[in-house]
Amino acid sequence: MRVRAQMAMVMNLDKCIGCSTCSVTCKQTWTNRDGVEYVWFNNVETKPGVGYPTRWEDQARWKGGWKLDSKGRLRLRSGGKIRKLATIFANPDLPSLDDYYEPATYDYDSLVTAPASERMPVARPLSAITGLPMKMETGPNWDDDLGGSALYAAADPNIAAMSERVQLSFEQTFMFHLPRICEHCLNPACVASCPSGAMYKRETDGIVLVDENKCRGWRMCVSACPYKKVYLNHVTAKAEKCTFCFPRIEEGTPTVCAETCVGRLRYIGLVLYNLDAVEEAAGSSGDLVEAARSCLLDPFDETVIAQAKLDGIAEDWIAAAQRSPIWALAMKHQVALPLHPEYRTLPMVWYIPPLSPVLDATAAMGGDNTSADDVFHAVTTMRVPLDYLAQLFTAGDADLVAGVLMKLAAVRSHMRALTTGAPNTTTDRGLEAADLEELYRLLAIAKIADRFVIPAAHREEGAQLASWTSGYPLDGPGSVGMSGPVPVAVPTLARSTRRRP
Amino acid sequence: MTYASIAFGVCPYVAIVVFIVGHVWRWKQDQFGWTSRTSQLMEKRWLMIGSPLFHVGALLAVLGHAMGLLVPAWLTEKLGVSDHVYHLMAVTGGVLAGVLLLSGLAILLLRRFITKARLRVVTRRADIVMYIVLGLTAVLGFTGTLVNVFTAGHDYRSTVAIWFRSVFTLQPDVAAMAASPWYFQAHAVCACAVLAVWPFSRLVHVWSVPLGYLIRPRIVYHTSAE
Ligand code: HEM
Ligand code: SF4
Ligand code: SF4
């Protein structure tokens, strides 16, 4: 056993209102530059729907993530090292700009300079890439709020994968929002596919970064990431990705997306994991959610604590791992699930599946959605939202999702009973009142101190932390990045100036 | 000084110095700019055809030059390769490399300058200069190959190759090169220009061929030891 610490996130999907504040604040912070106009390190999509880039979950097409080969060995879906080098001159699995979208601005000048006329002048859309007039036909969240509708739902790869092809009738329509960032995986396909070795996972906090000074633009990571969370900067021709806001995390501050989240639904904390268990878990032929959980170590276990100390993890970090909301939600109460565990990257952003589609379904069936019994009934009879959620979060295991949803419903009815004095049936189902109340405190009250348990990094041990070795954001002239990995695009020579519309 | 001593006595050394100093400077100053400058995001269909054609052609051409210029005639004779067989090998290899390289390059150029406005946005001045010198060099070189296919041709191993090797002994045999036909002479001058442009263009990506990938562990970790 080798103990490592991982900064992880949980998102409580029931609370996401799809406002995209997280996307905008992230963009303002990280991708408001030339070359990454089309890039959203954080994006929010409507599910069911096609997502961003369009149909990113269709791995038959994009070949992202890992698979087990015929002998049961773990292999990149896009092929081994030899194939990577053989296809280096042109990568058959790479999405093009049109698979994302062509970013646009408007010809605002025309509003001011148009000559007097009968009609109002119109500001036409101009491509933010070429400056030429363009038609806006898609966007990073084009099907926003329309996800459940037949048009977009039909194109959702998860729907196509469901056991019986469901025709979503109006009564069965449901939708929810899915905010996504890089998963900072334990078994990152992006890192494994980088021919230059420019991508790396930090052993101290698990954050996955691109060394901008080592990236040579072979663009294998972009296609290998099953979540499509590595992007090409078309000005620098290098890969860029979500940084988990490492300069903030190292200070003990939450990521920008989490801090600005309007729904207050994001949790950040440490988990301890066993580095030696990663490969086996990723290659598991059994239950993949269980496999993912099997990597995480109990921070209260004496042997884990002893080994963590041997492995150089500081006392305050171990304490933080014990108070971690991620440990509580993903492991102790097991209400948080990984996104697409079947990609086998062991993603470290976990999701609490939304109960609301089921609550809606309960009401539509004429049930009382404040009654746990009615909701349990709906959970077991309404296969459509359940199977869909199972495609997303449990590699198809609907019972696992049902179990989580029942727990969430139980919290509701337990707390309702507590406040109204009405009889409550939930403890009968093997759920302890104390657990339900703790979940209520974490999920419903969700105080800042409970949502974010982020120990600041130890500077005295921090030689490897990129923001210090590179003196992020700038060392001063001439010395940028010469002293260590440079995880963000800081140009050292004059960048080409491009015509901006 | 005659044009020949400038072209074949001075040019190559200027080019080599610029090539070496340029690379050292670029490596030290501009790790951040050291990339293949991939443009696949902007256009995929034609790149999928043009880039492999061009690259396989280019790598074959490099190999061919190494064999044709560095291996002296007496060595192949000693190895028992007859002139006829050598000629046949050189011509087949040369035509194959040339056709692949030039057809690939044509596709890449049409793609870049005709098909999509998006590609022009990501094209820099260094790219254009590089396309011009590389394209000219390739066309002139292929001319030499074609002449050798259709006519008795010119035995470059007694002119160009001798000059080429003499450049590295710092005693350039200008006369040998001056005795070759105009297309070989122009090819040599253009090739010097390619060398001079190299460190300042995307061609630096060639030195980063990621062969280390084949032997490195699956996941790269950065640890406190580093
Ligand atoms: C074996 C080593 C090489 C590798 C791995 C390699 C790889 C690459 C890659 C990945 C690209 C970017 C393609 C894209 O996505 O847009 C590229 C472009 C290019 N390479 Fe290479 N290359 C190699 C050798 C060479 C050589 C020997 C030459 C010529 C002397 C060359 C000339 C070029 C040119 C001109 C382009 C630009 C193509 C275009 O966009 O029009 N490469 N190379
Ligand atoms: S989600 Fe992040 S860490 Fe995982 S493979 Fe993609 S880019 Fe890499
Ligand atoms: S800011 Fe929060 S609530 Fe708004 S879209 Fe992002 S995750 Fe959802």
Image (cartoon, rainbow, N blue to C red):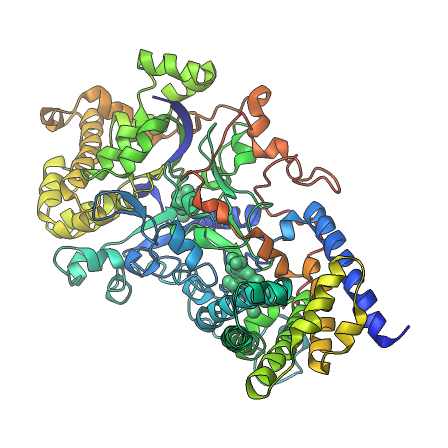
Please identify the quarter of the rendering in which residue A170 is found.
Answer: bottom left
Q: Is residue A352 visible?
A: yes
**Quadrant field for ligand 3:** top left
Q: Is residue B96 left or right of residue B147?
A: left
- Counting every numbered tag in the picture gives 0
Quarter holding the N terminus of chain A is: top left
Q: Residue at x 63, y 80 (%)?
A: B144
Residue sitting nearer the eye, A492 or A144: A492
* Coordinates of residue B29 in the picture (x, y in percent): 71, 47
* Coordinates of residue A384 in the picture (x, y in percent): 15, 53
Q: Is residue A251 left or right of residue B26?
A: left
Please identify the quarter of the rendering in which residue A435 is found.
Answer: top left
Q: Is residue A129 above or below residue A325?
A: below
Residue, far right: B1
* Coordinates of residue B140 in the picture (x, y in percent): 65, 79
Q: Is residue A258 above or below residue A152?
A: above
Q: Is residue A173 visible?
A: no
Residue sitting nearer the eye, B216 or B90: B90
Q: Residue at x 16, y 59 (%)?
A: A171
Q: Is residue B226 left or right of residue A500?
A: left
Quarter holding the C terminus of chain A is: bottom right
Q: Residue at x 25, y 24 (%)?
A: A437
* Coordinates of residue B27 in the picture (x, y in percent): 68, 48
Residue sitting nearer the eye, B51 or B19: B19
